[in-house]
């Protein structure tokens, strides 16, 4: 069975973009692959953060992952910082990674431009740690969206450089491309982001779901109900693709193009479908929140298993580089 690795930052409670773009896929993948899932708290500290908040957000994210349906009997879940081999391997990989490759990363350029007061070395080296996360477990596959392909390609290049210099230690990870279209924020302008205030929380209650969806931006063509629209240009319809059955989506698309339904009608259907999907997730989250020791036990067991794998891989890499095992 092929091994999959994927990670998510501890932003606290996930929003709908996290759920539809990552967690729903994680739940599907655990049926067919050996999956290792990680809350990547080392990555989170490359940005401004409050130390007293980070630990709580890490547990909140792990709880949400389990509530979304990741099964610790089928997949391994752990916190990145519980396995220090990640950072040691990242240092080894840094030593075969050209500086220019890191400076060309789009994410580094974007984040540096947005926050010029906190351009730290961790932000520059983020993709190398990401490569270490993957190859530490010799993962064959990495689920990625279109915005993450560049980082995975760098991971593959780092593996090629390392293996060419020191021998075949790491397999070259392959992308497992997501078919889900990225969900934009409810303002339709950018990806969902808490800092932009355009998110819908994964754990939102029924009333909040409707409160958020009702004013959400739709296709700009539909100024009046009688104006025909194009569903493929509407962010609300993109969300429908993750939560509404295909036959109902076809009906909504025809109604939009023919102006026989209004945007508010389309949103009501989506609100009902979202609530039907998320209600059991909310219930599982409440149950896990009431038993935090259970979540910590799952994370500890995951870290123990991952450390055993990580130590073995790191020993191979060290030996190949002429370092003591």
Image (spheres, rainbow, N blue to C red):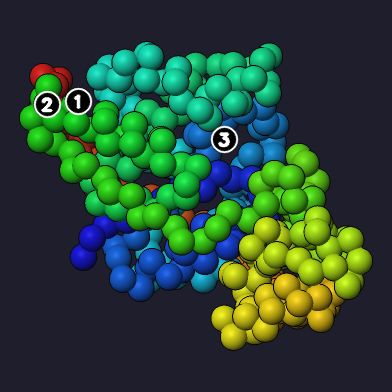
Q: Is mark 1 on a helix, strand or loop?
A: helix
3D distance between C-alphas at marks 2 and 1: 5 Å
**Residue sitting nearer the eye, 231 or 279:** 231
- Side (left or right) of 209 relative to 251: right
Q: Is mark 2 on a helix, strand or loop?
A: helix
Name the residue beneath numbered marker 1.
Answer: 161
Above-or-below relation of 181 to 320:
below
Where is residue 81? Give x, y as percent: 45, 38
3D distance between C-alphas at marks 2 and 3: 31 Å
Label 1: few (<14), some or many (≥20) within 10 Å? some
The answer to whether residue 273 of the structure is visible from this angle is: no
Label 3: few (<14), some or many (≥20) within 10 Å? some
Above-or-below relation of 323 to 283:
above
At x 46% / y 42%, what residue is drawn?
148
**Residue sitting nearer the eye, 12 or 82:** 12
The N terminus lies in which quarter of the figure?
A: bottom left
Q: Which badge, 2 or 3, comes first in the chain's sequence? A: 3
- Side (left or right) of 319 relative to 297: left
**Residue sitting nearer the eye, 24 or 51:** 24
Q: Which tag is nearer the camera, tag 2 or tag 3?
A: 2
3D distance between C-alphas at marks 1 and 3: 27 Å
Name the residue beneath numbered marker 2.
Answer: 164
Name the residue beneath numbered marker 3.
Answer: 44
Q: Do the residues labelled 2 and 1 touch (CB within 8 Å)?
A: yes
Where is residue 73? Give x, y as percent: 37, 71
């Amino acid at each position: 069975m092929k091994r999959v690795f994927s990670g998510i930052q501890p932003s606290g409670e996930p929003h709908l973009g996290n759920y539809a773009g990552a967690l729903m896929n994680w739940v599907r993948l655990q049926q067919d692959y050996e999956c290792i899932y990680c809350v990547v708290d080392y990555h989170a500290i490359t940005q401004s953060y409050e130390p007293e908040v980070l630990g709580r957000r890490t547990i909140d994210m792990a709880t949400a992952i389990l509530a979304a349906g990741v099964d610790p009997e089928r997949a391994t879940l752990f916190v990145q910082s519980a396995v220090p081999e990640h950072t040691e391997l990242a240092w080894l990989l840094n030593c075969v990674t050209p500086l220019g490759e890191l400076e060309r990363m789009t994410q580094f350029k974007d984040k540096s431009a947005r926050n010029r007061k906190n351009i730290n070395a961790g932000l520059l080296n983020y993709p190398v740690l990401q490569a270490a996360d993957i190859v530490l477990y010799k993962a064959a596959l990495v689920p990625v969206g279109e915005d993450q392909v560049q980082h995975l390609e760098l991971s593959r290049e780092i593996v090629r450089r390392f293996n060419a210099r020191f021998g075949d230690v790491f397999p070259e990870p392959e992308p497992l491309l997501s078919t889900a279209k990225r969900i934009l924020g409810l303002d339709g302008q950018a990806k969902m982001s808490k800092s932009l205030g355009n998110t819908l929380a994964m754990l939102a209650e029924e009333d909040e779901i409707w409160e958020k969806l009702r004013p959400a931006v739709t296709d700009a063509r539909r100024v009046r109900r009688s104006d025909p629209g194009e569903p493929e240009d509407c962010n609300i319809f993109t969300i429908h693709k993750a939560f509404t059955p295909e036959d109902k989506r076809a009906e909504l698309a025809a109604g939009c193009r023919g102006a026989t339904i209004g945007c508010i009608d389309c949103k009501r259907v989506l609100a009902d479908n979202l609530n039907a999907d998320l209600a059991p997730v909310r219930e599982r989250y409440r149950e896990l929140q009431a038993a935090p020791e259970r979540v910590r036990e799952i994370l500890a067991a995951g870290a123990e298993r991952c450390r055993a794998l990580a130590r073995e891989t790191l020993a191979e890499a060290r030996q190949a580089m002429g370092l003591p095992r």
